[in-house]
Image (cartoon, rainbow, N blue to C red):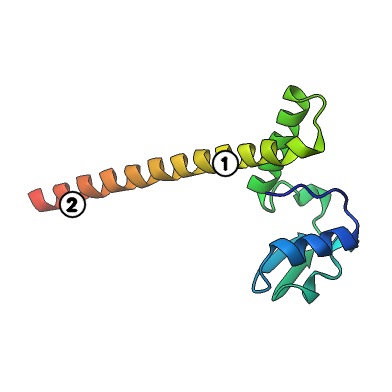
Amino acid sequence: MNVILGFKAEIIDNHVKDFISHKSTIITDDSTSYVNLENFVEEHKSQVIPKTKVGEILPWVHIAIGNARDMLLAIHHIIKPEYCKVILTSFVINLIEDILEKLSLIDYYWRVRRQKNEFRYRVR
């Protein structure tokens, strides 16, 4: 997780060159800041997302960004740039832990259900 200090194409390009593998595929919105990304990665897919479809396309991304923004505004009123990376990294780690916890619960549910079904079919 890195803090990007601006949305100009040059800033984004430098960040991509420094931190993202040239074998990567990047999916973005159709911002003019991303016009040069195809020069630095294997594939760049951009799409225009209508405002009415924002919640339908990558909803977890929008939820995560909204939650991070709300957390930063509510808890940290004045954040120095040197602390942004630490705070955002902490948020992302917590988000990943929550997702993994939910996935492990789903996995547990399906294993228990499969065991019950196997038992049910063996008894008959």
Q: CA distance from mark 1 to mark 2?
A: 37 Å
Q: Amino acid at mark 2?
A: Glu
Q: Position of residue 75 (x, y in %)?
A: 73, 23
Q: Nearer the viewer, residue 24 or 44?
A: 24
Whether residue 76 is visible? yes
Q: Position of residue 68 (x, y in %)?
A: 70, 36
Q: In the displayed structure, would residue 73 be above or below residue 15? A: above
Name the residue that disc number 1 marks.
93
Q: Which dot marks residue 122?
A: none
Q: Nearer the viewer, residue 25 or 61?
A: 25
Residue 85 is left or right of residue 37, and the answer is left
Which of the 4 image quadrants contains residue 77? Answer: top right
Name the residue that disc number 2 marks.
118
Q: In the displayed structure, would residue 110 be above or below residue 15? A: above
Residue 25 is left or right of residue 11, and the answer is left
Could you tell me which secondary element the residue under label 1 belongs to?
Answer: helix
In this rendering, the label closer to the viewer, 1 or 2: 1
